[in-house]
Structure formats: C-alpha cells, structure tokens
Image (spheres, rainbow, N blue to C red):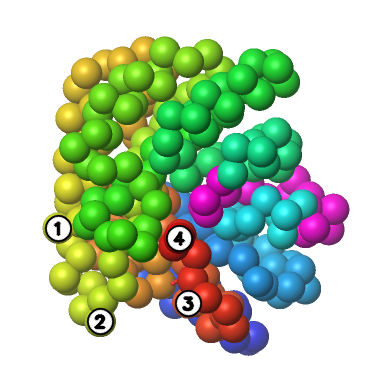
Amino acid sequence: MSVISTNLHNIQQNIGKAALQAGRSPQDVTLVAVTKTVPVELIEEALQCGIQHIGENRVQEAQRKYPVIGDRVCWHLIGHLQTNKVKTALSLFQLIHSVDRLGLAEEISRQAVQKELIARILVQVNVAGEDTKYGLDPAETIDFVSHIARLPGLKIEGLMTIAPFVDDPEEVRPVFRTLRQQAATIRELKIPGVSMDSLSMGMTGDYTVAIEEGSTLVRVGTGIFGSRSYTEEGIK
Ligand SMILES: *Cc1c(COP(=O)(O)O)cnc(C)c1O
C-alpha cells in the first residue's frame, strides 16, 4: 500500500473511533483532504483511495488544479479570501469556510445573485483571539450572522475555526467546545437562511478532539500527504 492510502486508512479509523466515543455516527464527519501545495498526481492518488472532498486555501492554486481534478470531488475553500477573487472562487468551490468580514459576505452575495446561485458559506471565528489568525471575534459572531443572513444568495451553513497550534490537542478542546456552543446558540434563533449544522474544525494535530466536540468537517493535510515545504496559512 502507498503512504497516502495507509495514512487515509488510519485517519478514517481514528475518525470512526472518535465519533463513536462521542456517541456520534462516523458518517456525520466529512474528511476534507487539504491539498494545498500537493501536486495533482498525489491528489489523484487520494481520490483513488476514496477521497471526495478537497480543501484549498488559494483561489489561484485551485484554478490551476481544477482542469485536472474537475468535478469528481467537492471543492472547499478554507483560506483567506480576497474580495476581488470572489467571482472566481464561486465558480470553483462548493463551500467557502472562511467568511470573516461584512465586505466579503456582501461581495459573495452580490456575485451569487449575478450568477443566479446560492453560495454555501461558513463563518470563520477566531475563538482563541490570536492576532495571527483571521476570523471574527466570538463576541461579534451572532450579530454578524444575523446581519449577513439578510443578504440574498447566501446559505449560512455553520462555523469554522482554526485552533492554536499546541503539542497536546487536549489544550484546544475548549476552543472547539466554544465554537459548537456558538453554533447551537445561533441555531436556536432560527434565522431564515441559517442552518448551523456544519462545524469545520480539526486539523492533523487535533481532529479527534474536534470530532469529540462535534466537528462535522475535519480539514487534514499533513496527516495524509506529509509535511508541506512552506509556511502555514489561515494565518495572516
Ligand atoms: C493547511 C490547513 C489545514 C491542514 O493543516 P494540517 O495541519 O496539515 O492538517 C487545515 N485548515 C486550514 C485552514 C489550513 O490552512
């Protein structure tokens, strides 16, 4: 077996175990293979192993890979999105995880209306308040969601966060718990156009803890493809 298939096998097993441990169904957790910096040949290999969701953090990189990979997978935009790239992003990605400011939500709405589609989005929250990370202040999240819910062409499906990098993932359990509680609070408001069923949280170092805390979308890169040779994103 190749390294990628072995890694994927182990990760799927860990996902299953973590879900069952939390009394959840493993099927309620989607593995998004983070393919930034990964060449298309290796992405192909992951697809052959059954991967159906890939995550990219740059619109241009996705644009370059799209002609090869195409619509065989669901594309997730997990990185910071510049307003001037929204139009292209909407033609490539099925779910945008990184909506973190009003101007961006407005531009996605405008472009979605123009393209006559409903843009599926998650709101990124900087739960731990790290200066180096994008995302809303948790105290502003509810108002922000209520506000952008009035914009046409948007379906607000949930929240996303990037936890601080730590050695022991137990340390970031409260971050994931806070995100889940925020989503639950917002769900109870029953705002039209807002479902809050998706929680995008958990990466290579912390996805099992995130699943125990309710994650429905784990974004795993290094754990599948090995280490990347450039600086992290989700970071300013
Ligand atoms: C790169 C990245 C990931 C994957 O990180 P790994 O530690 O390699 O699993 C997940 N989420 C975001 C937003 C990223 O930028």
Kind of residue at disc 1: Pro
Q: Separation of disc 3 and disc 4 at Cα?
A: 23 Å
Magenta-highlighted residues: 64-81
Residue 68 place in picture, x, y as percent: 83, 58
Question: Which disc number belongs to residue 167?
Answer: 2
- Nearer to me, 30 or 103: 103
- Look at discs 3 and 1 and give the one toward the viewer: 1
Q: Is residue 10 left or right of residue 92?
A: left
Q: In the rendered image, which residue does mark 1 sit on? A: 174
Kind of residue at disc 3: Gly
Q: Mark 3 or mark 1, which has the lower sequence index?
A: 1
Residue drawn where x is 75% and y is 45% of the image? 71
Residue 226 higher or lower than 52, as above or below: below
Q: Mark 3 or mark 2, which has the lower sequence index?
A: 2
Element type at mark 3:
helix
Kind of residue at disc 4: Lys
Residue 28 place in picture, x, y as percent: 38, 47
Q: Is residue 232 left or right of residue 113?
A: left
- Look at discs 3 and 2 and give the one toward the viewer: 2
Q: In the rendered image, which residue does mark 4 sit on? A: 236
- Look at discs 4 and 2 and give the one toward the viewer: 4
Residue 87 higher or lower than 26, as above or below: above
Question: Which disc number belongs to residue 223?
Answer: 3
